[in-house]
Image: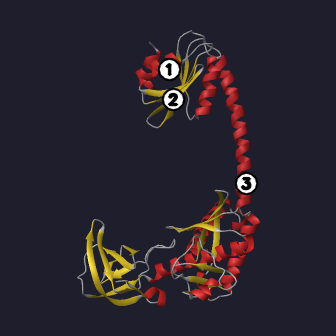
Amino acid sequence: MQTEKLYYADGRLFAFTAQVLSCRQEKEGCWVVLDRTAFYPEGGGQPADRGTLEGLPVLDVQERDGEVRHRLASPLAAGSTVTGRVDELWRQLMTQQHTGEHMLSGLAYRHFGCNNVGFHIGQESVRVDFDRPLDSGQLQFLEEEVNRAIWADLPVRGYYPDAAELAGLDYRSKKELEGPVRILTIPGCDCCACCGLHAARTGEVGLVKIISAQNYKGGVRLELLCGRWALEDYAKKHSLLTGIAQRFSVKPYEAACAVEKLEEELAAVKLRADGNFQRYLALAAAALPDTGRAQAFFEEGLSPDDLRRCALAFSARTSGPVAVFSPAGEGFQYALCQRDADVRPFGKGMNEALRGRGGGRPELVQGRTSASRQEIEAYFSL
């Protein structure tokens, strides 16, 4: 027996009663089939409704061969009458996302001939894939057109046209469809085959904001936010921007310039620091004695690149292996060099003795060791 789908007849029906037709215990829970339901099952890129049946949380809703199945943690007795309550805020959030996506996809098709080849409502955003690239100007145009349509508060209609009307409709569809086809229409925006639920009017969507775009399989993949998600995103970013502006003692819209100025100042400081480091290396290397034996040196706060530069500079002044160590976590990172020789055999022995790991080229080995400074100094004094 097919389940009567109350969500198509009334998208604002959030409380209902129904009879339990069956309840099957499976590994993931109890799957309950009702004679009628207002719970929308996952499908068409839209997640399932949330809510309760007889006070039990509805964990999932799926449709199989016309039956709408509700997954619960506990069983309900077959033949009993139960009360269902759909989470109204979740339904509203999902219909905002789905309707906003249709408006964007319909306008992209009308203005730029883009076909929607992928759509998914995730946990925090909506993903849409188009088969043609769109540049930043086109995306800005689409975003403005979508939001104008939202402000116009246009009617949104989902219905099953008869065969004659369907044959005369120019509607979007990802695949050939058989049997009854549910059509969604939004004046001036979209006409598309869709089994999902939508807002009654475009004004309910509130806002559509494209937050990212990337090239994808010859087209473009967009990430967008609609309605409450868009508002929450704005609130988070506004709070972050305000915080940054306060740190710089500037107005929020001046924060980017303040950050750019700081980057320029930091680049100048790094340049000066690098020059000082180069001078230090030259002086330190000039003072090294050429003992012909392996030597270890310890320097604070060196990056892997600085370690390399330091080891190369020191090894140029002595004929034996030179290792420079800098603290890193529980141990040390190191760079090992030897002038005019393959230092890798020495590095292999050092790693075995000092619980180290690393590798490199004949003239340079880099890695890490968990040995203490005392252990390292003892090894190099042998």
Residue 103 drawn above or below residue 155? above
Residue at the limit of the structure toward the top, as seen here: 292
Q: Quadrant of the C terminus?
A: top left
Q: Which mark is residue 347?
A: 1
**Residue at 62% across, 31% down:** 306
Residue 27 drawn above or below residue 380? below
Disc 2 from disc 1: Cα separation: 9 Å
Of the residues tagged 3 and 1, which is closer to the observer? 1
The answer to whether marks 3 and 1 mark residues whose Cβ atoms lie closer than 8 Å is no
Residue 84 visible in rendering: yes
Q: What amino acid is found at the position of numbered circle 2 in the picture?
A: Gly
Badge 3, how many Cα within 10 Å: few under 14, some, many 20+? few
Residue located beneath label 3 in the image: 260
Residue 269 placement (x, y as % from top left): 71, 42
Secondary structure type for disc 2: strand
Q: What amino acid is found at the position of numbered circle 1 in the picture?
A: Gly
Residue 86 drawn above or below residue 324? below
First in sequence, mark 2 or 3: give its number. 3
The answer to whether marks 2 and 1 mark residues whose Cβ atoms lie closer than 8 Å is yes
Residue 170 placement (x, y as % from top left): 66, 80
Badge 2, how many Cα within 10 Å: few under 14, some, many 20+? some
Left or right relative to 97: residue 210: right
Secondary structure type for disc 1: helix
Q: Quadrant of the N terminus?
A: bottom left
**Residue at 55% across, 73% down:** 229
Secondary structure type for disc 3: helix
Disc 3 from disc 1: Cα separation: 43 Å
First in sequence, mark 2 or 1: give its number. 1
